[in-house]
Image: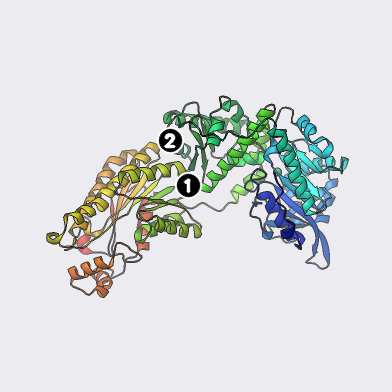
Amino acid sequence: MKSRWCERAAAGLDPLALRVYSSRLLGAEPSLVLFGGGNTSVEHVVDDPRGGQVRALTIKGSGTDLATIAADGFATLVLDDLLPLRARARLDDDAMVRLVTRALIDPAAPRPSIETLLHAFIPLAWIDHSHADAILALTNQPDGAARIRGVFGGDVGLVPYIKPGFELSQAAADVFDANPGVQGLVLDKHGLVTFGADARESYERHVALVSRAEAHVARVWRGPAAASAPPPAADPAALALRIRGRASRRRRVIVRFDGSPRVRAFVDRPDAATLAGQGPATPDHVLRTKRLPLLLDSVDPAAAAAAIEGYEAEYLAYVRRGGGPHAAVVHDPAPRVVLAPGVGMFTCGRTAAEADAVARIYRHTMNVIEGADALGGYRALPERDLFEIEYWPLELYKLQNAPPERELAGRVAVVTGAASGIGKAAAQRLAAAGAHVVVTDVDLHGAAAAAAQIADAGGAADALPLDVTDEASVAAAFEHIVLTVGGLDIAVSNAGIAAAAALEDLTLAAWRRSLDVNATGHFLFTRAAVRAMRAQGLGGSIVLVCTKNAFDPGRDFGAYSAAKAAELQLGRVLAIESGGHGVRVNMVNPDAVFQDSRLWSAQLRAGRAAAHGVAVDDLEDFYRARNLLQTRVTAADVAEAVLFLASDRAAKTTGAVLPVDGGVRGAFPR
Ligand code: ZN
């Protein structure tokens, strides 16, 4: 590991700015810390709001990510309120949290790290703590302590494993006090702490100690094989669908697939079961990955589903064995990491970001495991210690105080023709309700812009090119969707085109083009959606965006109206055939939605204006005036109907047609 320190960047910074700077240097190194792991602090003198100045400890807030931390990610505490606690014989977690919280200078600051007292009790001003892969490869062995001694001699103090909190802080301070000349402390099966009189000293010691550990590991393990892996032993998409279907029984999850050579090098090992059956590299990871991954014996999709059932039963038994006052709260027992020999790794999370975090952590876990194994054998913490962290009241508190989830949390929605108009509005509305939305369109650029807009608004969206008239394009899109999110719950079949011409003047090409997009396109897309939903076994909801023309056609619009009538009938038959599998199929019939619409081209406007005998500029008013409510129908109105039909609010409705047209009498469903 190389030092990233830049004296020019660090020069002239005040202690807090410097603390932000060097914290980010640690955070920039994924082999040191991932996603909120690790913490840093500085002791300095600050203004006391009561007057004068006060000695303070500024420490990272709990759960804040070092890679992106800013000044507001830290909490500042009165040091002289914390130091007397060193004399206590014992202090339980609740009392410790109360006393630490009371020492905050600004009560509105982030919750200080659970390792605050460890930082307070070590008398050096700058402290850096990480869960470095290479350090864990040394400690996570049958003879970890001897290994640390062998590599570092007396340069580090070794602190036996203790759950973070008061006891660990005392033990770490005792080890330091016994030998204040050490450059750092290795926390057994947990990580590394370094300290220094200035920011650079603490950081450089961290890099130097991790580099020594890396060099020691590299003598026996050169890193994962970089070569390409043989082709997968089973179809990863078929497996992903079954895994998501089975792992989502209690709570919908997003499933990510990683079949990279690095992952294959681990899952294809003949001893993968032994290695993966040990546990996480550092206790912090148990909250994301669970104690154990599920390693599949068979990559047959049905066998994978049965294996998840077995995993859940074992997980519930583990919770019962752990017992304790908080075992009444049971996390979702489904696995977070599923390893498929010959195929790759599937990771599960409530969101795609969470599934990604699990994947990144487990890829680092593979490095720790393989490094430790090459040195002499990988050994994780015993089950009891990991249970204590997974069901630690301080962690459960975080979960209980999380904001309530949105209606469609964990659901995946795929929308066609979503770069503009109704499709875009539907994608936005479903994302606002919490769904992970796949925005598809023939116009990838437009789809990407719509997805970016959703992300800016705090939603989750991917963009994908999709030509609904092309069977291969539909198949490729669904394969991509299944491998990136695991499957789907909602399919909105919306893509459409329109051209105005009297039937006697209509070209065969224009007729065929309308049927291709407005009828066959819905067939190809909904067929793929139903197949995926049935393989998943979670039911699903399909919404077809039709048109009021299907019931109430107008002149000079034959190719469009006939194809859309076919779409509507397709939806009804699909509802009949899919009901037994819990897949609902409903239709919305909008009328005259002009806003942000590509369907309403200048040519179409001219054609419809001529057909109705009004001026082009009066066309929108004409449509508004002809409906019962005399109102303009917007894309957002249609999106609201799509959300209703897509969500469980319409759980008992299938085969229905919901008009969103202001009330067009001739279009009443019949
Ligand atoms: Zn830690």
Q: Is residue 255 left or right of residue 566?
A: right
Give the mark nearest the N terminus, 2 or 1: 2
Query: Viewer-proximal residue, 663 or 162?
Result: 162
Q: Report the residue marked by disc 1.
A: 410
Q: Would you identify the image quadrant in which residue 134 lies? A: top right
Do we see residue 143 in this rendering? yes
**Quadrant of the image containing the N terminus:** top right
Q: Which percent across, then down, holds residue 632?
A: 31, 69
Q: Is residue 214 left or right of residue 334?
A: right
Q: Are marks 2 and 1 in contact (CB under 8 Å)?
A: no
Residue 543 higher or lower than 390, as above or below:
below
Does the numbered disc 2 mark a residue whose Cβ is under 8 Å from ligand 1? no
Q: Is residue 507 left or right of residue 283?
A: left
Q: Report the residue marked by disc 2.
A: 242
Which SS class for mark 1?
Answer: loop
For this orientation, the residue located farthest to the front is: 227
Q: Is residue 87 left or right of residue 475?
A: right
